[in-house]
Image (spheres, rainbow, N blue to C red):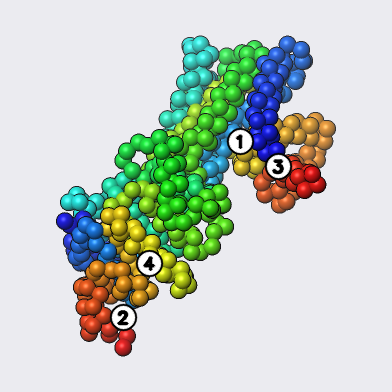
């Protein structure tokens, strides 16, 4: 089943075309990677899907319903969650409160505070941050910040989770842990769309990869197809 | 030991609150009118500061529209004071401010930082100048007489408003609305991405804070007897709540309360004792607090308190 679908998605910043007629689709249960050189429009595409930015033209549908034009909080409640390239945590709040806020506000249902608290605790345990619940988010080391952002996104009960460079700045051990976490999330039945520069991770966890270059989709396929594609090697991967 | 401290602390602070409340309620019975009037002014500043903090504290949107909401209350009181009973006059003042805040909120809460500050300040100036123009060209008068109310009644009304504002501030802090407001203040984009309708949350809270400012304006007008747009929309009333809140510290609920109380009392003392130097002294104190006490007076006291406890724990 198609979960997310974009048709001729276009975004202009003044005279600059950040995205030009990009078509894409993501199926239920898939892990899809989004790669491309810097400035290719990857984060812009995420911003259009999550509602941070309005589209210039084209249409984005989620579960068959049009979501382009909705506000971020409405899209979140439909079941789309994301993380940010530079972790945007509630820095002055505790780790627990970060997750709690997402549990309380992230879904269409009304949830009682004790239930939300239990859920937030469970998710902190899921990303292995239970012992840091009372710390302020700003005091966390980088790897834990990224994990907290994942927990916060998960707390909104998404069916589609978008990671914007969740592995940037991590050391090899932390990258391995992060890959494990992604597999665990996928096993929960959550569909994943991820921007990543760590090729090893992308090639290992993704079922399918989309390549953007100068705002256009230049390739799409399985990791093997992408790794051997002439165009992709030329513009992005290098010889 | 921690447990004992917690068990002991709650009834203790509740009892203290009750005691303060009883003192405040019975005060007009045994102190001279001057003190009651001084206390009325202090309570006015506390209500303005606490209501300002309800919105601006957690969201970090610095609003300079307090004078607008206060002034709307004052003018409502002048316009309907002769025809309506006092409680309804005050309710009308609060509601008009509430509605104005919703309009202003929907217009301006998309702005951030400096733009928001300037816009809110312009709103009160706009209303003040519009009223001045209206009064001089349309009605041919500048000021208005307000129905006088006994100073004890004014005191009790402002005391009730004070209690309600404090209670509202307390409940909002502890509620999910409070958590939403803090999330917005910390990282607004992330807050909207976890499902918080930031525009709605901000507008409603802004209006709640304006509600109490309007009520305060409506009752204070009856104390002043004569008002005009310059008195009602005095820009100082926009700046003072901000300064008082910073002075007291916005981290705790009682920060703005103590900040406003000390600040207002200090102003009274300095104007009477040092009429020529009071602005100079006042300014110096303010600069010292802003430079050296980032969490305000209450933050400093808390630090001492915690430091003291820490030392005691270390030796025991």
In this rendering, position of residue B132 left or right of residue B271: left
Q: Which residue is mark 3?
A: B302
Mark 1 Cα within 10 Å, few/some/many (few <14, many 20+)? some
Residue at the spot of label 4: A179
- Residue placed at 49% from the left, 55% from the top? A129
The Cα–Cα distance between marks 2 and 3, rounded to whole angstroms, is 56 Å
Crowdedness near tag 2: few (<14), some (14–19) or many (≥20) residues, C-alpha within 10 Å: some
Q: Quadrant of residue A210?
A: bottom left
- Assign the N terminus of chain A to one quadrant of the image: bottom left
Circle 3 or circle 4, nearest the eye:
4
Find residue A231 and report its horizontal and vertical position in percent.
23, 82
Of callouts 2 and 4, which one flags the residue occurring earlier in the amino acid sequence? 4
Q: What residue is at 45 percent from the left and 25 percent from the top?
A: B95
Q: Say which chain tag 1 marks.
A: B
Check disc 2 and report the residue beneath it.
A236
For the residues labelled 3 and 4, the Cα–Cα distance comes to: 44 Å
Q: Give the Cα separation between the discs numbered 1 and 4.
A: 44 Å
Image mark 3: chain: B
Distance of mark 3 from mark 1, alpha carbons?
13 Å
Element type at mark 1: loop
The CA span between labels 2 and 4 is 22 Å
């Amino acid at each position: 089943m198609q979960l997310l679908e974009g048709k001729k998605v276009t975004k202009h910043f003044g005279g600059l075309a950040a995205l030009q007629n990009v078509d894409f689709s993501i199926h239920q249960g898939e892990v899809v990677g989004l790669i491309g050189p810097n400035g290719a429009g990857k984060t812009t595409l995420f911003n259009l899907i999550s509602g941070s930015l309005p589209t210039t033209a084209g249409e984005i549908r989620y579960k068959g319903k049009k979501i382009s034009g909705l506000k971020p909080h409405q899209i979140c409640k439909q079941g789309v969650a994301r993380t940010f390239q530079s972790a945007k945590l509630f820095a002055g709040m505790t780790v627990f409160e970060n997750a709690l806020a997402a549990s309380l506000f992230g879904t269409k249902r009304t949830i009682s505070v004790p239930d939300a608290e239990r859920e937030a605790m469970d998710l902190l345990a899921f990303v292995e941050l239970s012992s840091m619940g009372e710390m302020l988010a700003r005091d966390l080391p980088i790897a834990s910040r990224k994990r907290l952002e994942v927990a916060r996104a998960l707390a909104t009960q998404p069916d589609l989770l978008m990671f914007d460079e969740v592995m940037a700045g991590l050391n090899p051990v932390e990258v391995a842990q992060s890959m494990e976490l992604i597999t665990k999330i996928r096993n929960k039945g959550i569909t994943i769309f991820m921007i990543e520069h760590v090729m090893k991770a992308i090639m290992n966890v993704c079922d399918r990869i989309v390549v953007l270059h100068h705002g256009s989709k230049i390739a799409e396929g399985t990791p093997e197809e992408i790794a051997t594609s002439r165009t992709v090697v030329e513009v992005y991967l290098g010889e | 030991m921690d447990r004992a401290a917690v068990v002991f602390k709650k009834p203790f602070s509740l009892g203290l609150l009750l005691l303060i409340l009883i003192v405040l309620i019975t005060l007009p019975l045994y102190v001279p009118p001057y003190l009651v009037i001084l206390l009325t002014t202090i309570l006015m500043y506390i209500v303005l500061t606490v209501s300002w903090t309800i919105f601006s504290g957690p969201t970090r949107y610095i609003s300079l529209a307090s004078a607008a909401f206060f002034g709307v209350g004052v003018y409502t009181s002048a316009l309907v004071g002769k025809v309506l009973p006092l409680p309804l006059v005050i309710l009308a003042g609060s509601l008009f401010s509430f509605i104005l805040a919703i309009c202003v909120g929907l217009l301006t809460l998309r702005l951030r930082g400096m733009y928001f500050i300037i816009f809110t300040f312009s709103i009160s100036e706009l209303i003040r100048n519009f009223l001045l123009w209206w009064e001089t060209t349309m009605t041919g008068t500048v000021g208005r007489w307000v129905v006088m109310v006994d100073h004890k009644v004014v005191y009790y009304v402002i005391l009730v408003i004070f209690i309600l504002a404090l209670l509202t501030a307390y409940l909002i802090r502890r509620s999910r609305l409070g958590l939403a407001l803090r999330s917005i203040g910390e990282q607004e984009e992330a807050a909207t991405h976890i499902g918080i309708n930031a525009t709605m949350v901000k507008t409603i809270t802004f209006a709640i804070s304006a509600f109490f400012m309007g009520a305060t304006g409506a009752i204070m007008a009856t104390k002043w007897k004569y008002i005009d747009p310059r008195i009602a929309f005095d820009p100082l009333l926009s700046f003072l709540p901000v300064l008082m809140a910073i002075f007291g510290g916005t981290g705790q609920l009682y920060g703005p309360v103590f900040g406003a109380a000390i600040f207002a009392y200090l102003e009274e003392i300095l104007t009477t004792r040092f009429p020529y130097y009071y602005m100079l002294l006042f300014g110096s104190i303010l600069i010292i607090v802003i430079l050296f006490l980032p969490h305000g007076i209450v933050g400093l006291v808390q630090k001492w308190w915690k430091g003291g406890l820490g030392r005691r724990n270390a030796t025991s």
